Image: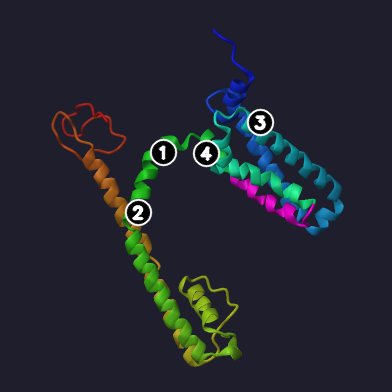
Amino acid sequence: MPSVSLKERLNEVIFGTETPAGKLFDMVLITAILLSVVAVMLDSVIWFANLYHLELLWIEWFFTLLFTAEYLTRIYCARNSWQYMRSFYGIVDLISILPTYLALIFTGANYLMIIRLLRVLRIFRILKLVRYLSEANVLVRSMLASRRKIFVFFCTVLVLSTVFGSLMFVVEGPEHGFTSIPKSIYWTIVTITTVGYGDITPQTAIGQVVASMAMLTGYSIIAVPTGILTAELATEMQRERIGRQCRNCRKSGHDRDAEHCKYCGAQLFE
């Protein structure tokens, strides 16, 4: 057997997750990413940064050099270096190390390193979420099937928000905080979604009546998108159950995890 080259070994460890070394590499990398993000967050706290400014600076440069070495190693051992550099993770890997170097030129650019958090997406490779791919496909198909209904619902809410916002601008006016129609529409959206920040409130009786109508409208429509998606999801699940047909008795309607037919007891096959 020919000896495995260093490049192939690195590729197996860095890009693979099946080997113990590959899993360990990903876990160490994710831990380093999280620690670097925590360091950036702590550096934004003024009193903490004043006490440990030098330590945080050394920590950040340590992680930057570490991720730089990791990025260059990935380019070296990738089977197609240019394809990796143009991929999503390749771009994220590059962007995650640029802010520290840019901070030498532009003040405050180091806080852009929060984008390193995107690299935690690699954890999905370790958790082997592929085994849940079929369930994810059901959810995606349900969302795609209901996209037109949800879009119509969204447009309806937008129209209602524009109407209520325009009424509040006319009734309340700038003296009560409704300085423009867009700001009034913002208040309407906050009210319809039952968030209610309270930064703008109606003061007149007519304005409070309009606000009450907007609140009741919000409670009336809040369950609509949930119902649409739930109905489509139930339809997709029913289709999958119908699709599992027993080869012996030709009957369908079996659960996904069923191993035997509930009518004749024969073994089910995918």
Q: Which residue is mark 4?
A: 124
Amino acid carrying mark 2 in the image: Leu
Q: Residues within 10 Å of mark 4 (few under 14, many from 20)?
A: few
Where is mark 3, residue-wise? 73
Closest to the camera, between mark 2 and mark 4, is: 2
Q: Which residues are magenta?
A: 105-118
Instruction: Look at 42% across and 82% down and name the residue there.
Output: 163
Callout 3, which amino acid? Thr
Against 252, residue 44 (above or below) is below
What quarter of the picture does the N terminus occupy? top right
The residue type indicated by label 4 comes to Phe
Residue 209, image quadrant: bottom left
Disc on the earlier residue, 2 or 3: 3
Q: Residues within 10 Å of mark 1 (few under 14, many from 20)?
A: few
| Mark 3: few/some/many CA within 10 Å (<14, 14-19, 20+) | some
Q: Is residue 212 visible?
A: no
